[in-house]
Amino acid sequence: MFSGEFLLAYVIFAVVLTMVLLLWTNTTGNINAAEEMYDMERLAVDVSEKLMKTPGFPEDWTTADVMSVGLVNDSGDMDPEKVMGFVALMGNETNYEDNKHLLGIRLYEFYFYLENLSGSVVSVNGTPCVTGKSPVNETGRFTMKRAGVFNNTVVRSVLTVWR
């Protein structure tokens, strides 16, 4: 019953099964990573649109009554008070964790800043327009840049969504 042919067939079967399992694991890992990147990309586009194209809700929101964050005023320019309110709203670790749901961000983290066209961070009264958590990994993130007008100057908003 236990012959050399049986042993050879068993070894071949074990090698083929091992290769199939390794390929399966590798393929599902690649699919999951691609789905996560797609989800981060979609989220970054949605949040960037919300911040740069809506006034938020209520339209004259403050950090005390905000239900949806938007950074523009009636004319479509970025409102310095709303930008600084957003920076304050997400300013420290506790505020960040308590309020990131206002952007619709669930499983991910975000980092937001405004830069001028030369790449320097924009400041208002000495306070840099930067908020969120700075990304710690190089691979699991997506960055979205949008142009806008802030204090009669063209700026870029940079939003990075990361895991």
Image (spheres, grey):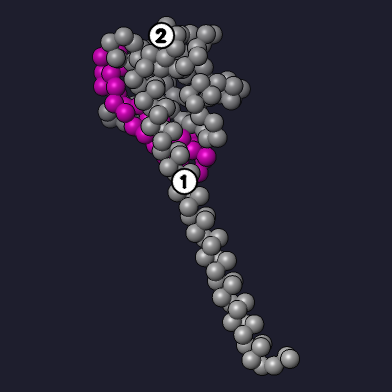
Kindly state the secondary structure of the residue where label 2 is placed: loop
Residue 148: image quadrant is top left
Spatial CA distance of label 1 from label 2 is 34 Å
Instruction: Left or right? Give the position of 147 relative to 45.
Output: left
Residue at image location 42% in from the left, 14% down from the top: 56
Which residue occupies the extreme right position in the image?
Answer: 1
Please name the residue that numbered disc 1 is placed on: 35
Query: Which SS does the magenta portion mostly show?
Result: strand
Q: Nearer the viewer, residue 129 or 109?
A: 109
- Quick one: label 1, few (<14), some, or many (20+) residues within 10 Å? few
Residue at image location 48% in from the left, 24% down from the top: 103
Q: Position of residue 3 (x, y in %)?
A: 69, 93
Residue 153: image quadrant is top left
Instruction: Left or right? Give the position of 5 relative to 36.
Output: right
Q: Which mark is residue 59?
A: 2
Q: Is residue 125 visible?
A: no
